[in-house]
């Protein structure tokens, strides 16, 4: 039996496994959707009920229908589904016995060559693995999904069913997936849940977001049982050399791909989505499920890898504390058995005014500010384009709701804006021409309770003046909202500091994970504080916008001739001196200035890829080897984005600093040396989720000057007066990135299509940088 490790991590998210069954050569698609919401607080404890899983399942049903998966092929166990408005009746509740019966029932439905989506949404946790287990877990614990009828700890007696009463073990799910694959069934597994954290942690901005996890304490698992499991795991690992992640799933005849909402030990969230939007357009969803469904409903994705890129782009607003989704398996397989074809949805459009149309697509379909649609006027008889109204008609999203968008006529690419739309009687459809890149930053001021001292009152005055300022006079597109409204950044004045909160539910006042803040000193003035706050917000906006723009170009066709392979070299900590200021107070060194060290390990060997976030530490080094396999030059600018909103230009190994990689040239190697402590200043350095971004452009053979996007690393808001504007800044990619990094207050969105058409693209890696000892 192939043993598959099921990772129950933040919020069991949504999967979609579907295709176009109207084609005879496509496999049949099935889905088993399990969502547990109404946990009984009297059984477990306070704060365990969830609101999102029932909505997650309804959203997944909607997305599967968009891919023509028939309702009869969906087996659904979800409580409260009738409260979501979906016209689908669940087949039962997500209790343990019903889930096991559904496993057995799905095995009788499927035939060789079919595809099955297995989806979980609800609470996750973990329990100590029984002593003497035939296949010990690396950490000594079994991950568990909590059915609706979950109970408490009953002890471990060598029986896999002992432990938490009615828990569904990872091994049990693995056996079900094995059974499917043994029948030559392709499986897409989606898990949106945690196995750590606290169920009643109020976890989110303004109470809008919370974790999907139940603590081991709430489940009644005694401390001595947990300690014994950890000690057994440590004894098993001793003498085995450097620890490595779980081996990647071996792809058998049936095939397998998995999306997890977070890496093991991290938290996933549910809450009001989209993160920013009108109140009437938002509802509770699992964060990852929401972005999976967005990607499916918006179309334009050919493979599971393409969909994973879409999901990752949805996490850019969360900053360095973002949960990091995990993807594994046959990610290059055609999405939902489509055979490589790309679904390009067409939505009904309705005439509203001469320059305005309403389109039946909104936030749930992934429509965001700046999205551009092409309106096609249809002949009611042939359903083809109407010969009397050839267009083109392009409209840009102006008001976005949950399922509908008001859009106004706009110029697009080389087309001027049309003078008017056809009249009310015209039959019109809309397709997404450019999803747009959102560039504005929303900010809310949290209401403060209690007495304010003079310094804090001065800060409130500066914030009030900034919020009341004419938006056109601000240095960045910042949208101030009323207290309590959803926003990207929450500002709180407390303890003689101005705190800038992104993903964290509350202020983290001490330690290396401390929240970003501006300390208010006695010499501060209102004007100086106002300028400093605006500058810090612009810095946060610039980093988020660069990531959004780069994410829009992932997987672009311009990268097809740029091969890349990543490696990690892990540093060995030296013996610290008696006067060491921290566990990472030691200088880093480059092992070899001209080559990747022989003891560096490739991402492939680690069972990971550019989609997943490794845990790395002080003095580790990441290398990326780049090879031009085509017949035209490719210019690559490597940028590093740290957790403190810094953007840095990375070097290549060797003496050449040029960004140009010629056809047939020896591979170029980018390297990133990681630091959690600055041994020269004596202060901790960056830690958290960090990224390496490779901006690439395929050039014409006679292009003489390499493009270099290092101007993005400039610390100042505007380019220095004596800085030359180079070809890179004038290029479509340069214009997009310049708008993202340096766009003024009127720059609320940008378009990615020109850069894509110019054979530009991005490759992005991410990792979580952890100081030595921080994870213990």
Image: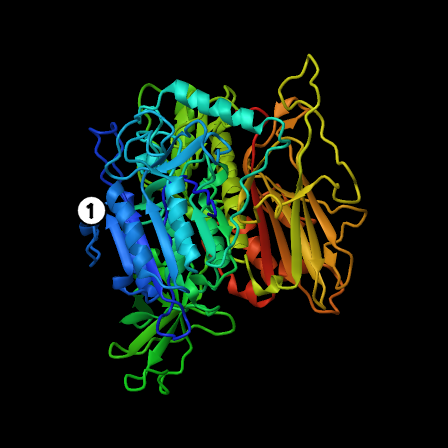
Q: Nearer the viewer, residue 318 or 604?
A: 604
Circle 1 sits in a helix, a strand or a loop, which is it? Answer: loop
Image height of 715 relative to 107, above or below = above
- What residue do we see at 33% from left, 26% from top? 448
Image height of 662 relative to 156, above or below = below
- What residue do we see at 50% from left, 19% from top? 522
The image quadrant of residue 159 is: top left
Q: Which residue is mark 1?
A: 80
Farthest residue to the top: give it.
Answer: 578
Chosen colour scheme: rainbow
Where residue 746 sits in the image (x, y, percent)? 46, 53
> Does residue 6 appear to the left or right of 167 in the view shown?
right
Where residue 310 sits in the image (x, y, percent)? 46, 55
Where residue 307 sits in the image (x, y, percent)? 46, 57
Figure label count:
1
> Does residue 478 appear to the left or right of 535 in the view shown?
left
Image height of 761 relative to 81, above or below = below
The answer to whether residue 633 is seen in the rendering is yes
Farthest residue to the right: give it.
Answer: 655
Q: Residues within 10 Å of mark 1 (few under 14, many from 20)?
A: some
Q: Nearer the viewer, residue 243 or 293?
A: 243
Q: Nearer the viewer, residue 662 or 292?
A: 292
Where residue 322 sits in the image (x, y, percent)? 46, 39
The answer to whether residue 726 is seen in the rendering is no
Q: Nearer the viewer, residue 337 or 394?
A: 337
- What residue do we see at 67% from left, 55% from top? 636
Image height of 147 relative to 232, above or below = below
């Amino acid at each position: 039996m192939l043993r598959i490790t099921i990772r129950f991590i933040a919020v069991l998210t949504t999967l979609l496994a579907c295709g176009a069954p109207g084609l005879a050569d496509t496999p049949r698609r099935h889905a088993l959707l399990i969502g547990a919401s109404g946990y009984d607080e009297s059984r477990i404890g306070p704060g365990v009920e969830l609101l999102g899983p029932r909505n997650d399942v309804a959203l997944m049903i909607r997305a599967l229908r968009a891919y023509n998966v028939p309702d009869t092929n969906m087996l659904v166990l979800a409580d409260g589904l009738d409260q979501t408005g979906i016209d689908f009746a669940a087949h039962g509740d997500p209790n343990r016995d019903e889930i096991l019966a559904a496993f057995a029932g799905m095995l009788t439905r499927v035939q060789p060559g079919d595809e099955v989506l297995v989806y979980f949404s609800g609470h996750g946790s973990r329990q100590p693995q029984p002593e003497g287990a035939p296949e010990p877990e690396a950490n000594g614990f079994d991950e568990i999904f909590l059915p609706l009828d979950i109970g408490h700890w009953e002890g471990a007696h060598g029986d896999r069913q002992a432990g938490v009463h009615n828990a569904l073990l990872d091994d049990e799910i693995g056996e079900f997936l094995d059974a499917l694959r043994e029948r030559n069934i392709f499986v897409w597994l989606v898990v949106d849940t945690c196995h750590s954290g606290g169920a009643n942690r109020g976890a989110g901005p303004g109470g809008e977001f919370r974790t999907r996890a139940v603590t081991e304490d709430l489940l009644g698992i005694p401390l001595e049982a947990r300690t014994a499991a950890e000690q057994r795991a440590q004894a098993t690992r001793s003498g085995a050399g450097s620890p490595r992640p779980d081996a990647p799933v071996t792809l058998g005849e049936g095939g397998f791909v998995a999306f997890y909402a977070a890496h093991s030990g991290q938290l996933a969230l549910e809450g009001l989505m989209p993160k920013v939007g009108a109140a009437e357009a938002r509802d509770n969803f699992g964060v990852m499920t929401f972005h999976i469904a967005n990607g499916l409903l918006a179309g334009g994705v050919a493979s599971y890898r393409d969909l994973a890129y879409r999901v990752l782009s949805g996490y850019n607003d969360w900053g360095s504390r973002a949960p990091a989704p995990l993807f594994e398996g046959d990610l290059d397989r055609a999405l939902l058995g489509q055979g490589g074809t790309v679904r390009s949805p067409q939505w009904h459009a309705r005439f509203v005014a001469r320059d305005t149309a309403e389109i039946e697509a909104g936030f749930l379909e992934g429509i965001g500010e700046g999205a551009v649609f092409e309106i096609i006027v249809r002949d009611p008889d042939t359903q083809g384009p109407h010969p009397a109204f050839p267009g083109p008609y392009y409209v840009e999203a102006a008001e976005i709701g949950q399922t509908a968008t008001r859009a106004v006529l706009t110029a697009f690419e080389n087309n001027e804006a049309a003078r008017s739309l056809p009249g009310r009687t015209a039959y019109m459809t809309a397709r997404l021409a450019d999803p747009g890149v959102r560039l504005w930053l929303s900010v809310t001021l949290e209401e403060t309770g209690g007495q304010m001292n003079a310094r804090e009152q001065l800060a409130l005055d500066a914030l009030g003046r900034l919020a009341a300022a004419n938006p056109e006079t601000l240095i960045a597109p910042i949208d101030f909202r009323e207290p309590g409204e959803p926003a990207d950044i929450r500002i709180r004045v407390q303890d003689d500091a101005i705190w800038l909160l992104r993903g964290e539910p509350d202020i983290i006042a001490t330690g290396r994970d401390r929240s970003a803040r501006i300390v208010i000193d006695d010499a501060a003035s209102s004007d100086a504080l106002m300028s400093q706050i605006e500058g810090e917000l612009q810095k946060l906006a610039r980093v988020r916008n660069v990531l959004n723009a780069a994410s829009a170009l992932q997987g672009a066709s311009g990268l097809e001739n740029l091969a890349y392979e990543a490696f990690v070299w892990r540093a060995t900590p030296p013996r610290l001196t008696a006067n060491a200021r921290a566990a990472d107070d030691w200088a880093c060194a480059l092992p070899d200035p001209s080559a990747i060290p022989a003891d560096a390990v490739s991402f492939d060997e680690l069972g990971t890829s550019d989609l997943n976030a490794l845990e790395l530490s002080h003095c580790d080094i990441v290398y990326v080897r780049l090879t031009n396999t085509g017949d035209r030059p490719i210019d690559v600018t490597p940028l590093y984005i740290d957790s403190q909103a810094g953007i840095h230009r990375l070097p290549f190994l060797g003496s050449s600093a040029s960004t140009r990689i010629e056809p047939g040239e020896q591979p170029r190697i980018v390297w990133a040396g990681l630091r959690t402590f600055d041994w020269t200043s004596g202060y901790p350095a960056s830690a958290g989720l960090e990224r390496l971004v490779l901006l690439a452009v395929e050039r014409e053979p006679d292009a003489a000057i390499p493009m270099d996007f290092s101007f993005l690393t400039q610390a100042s808001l505007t380019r220095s007066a004596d800085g030359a504007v180079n070809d890179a800044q004038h290029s479509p990619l340069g214009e997009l990135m310049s708008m993202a990094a340096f766009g003024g207050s009127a720059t609320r969105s940008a378009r990615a299509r020109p850069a894509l058409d110019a054979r530009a693209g991005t490759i992005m890696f991410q990792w979580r940088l952890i100081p030595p000892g921080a994870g213990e």
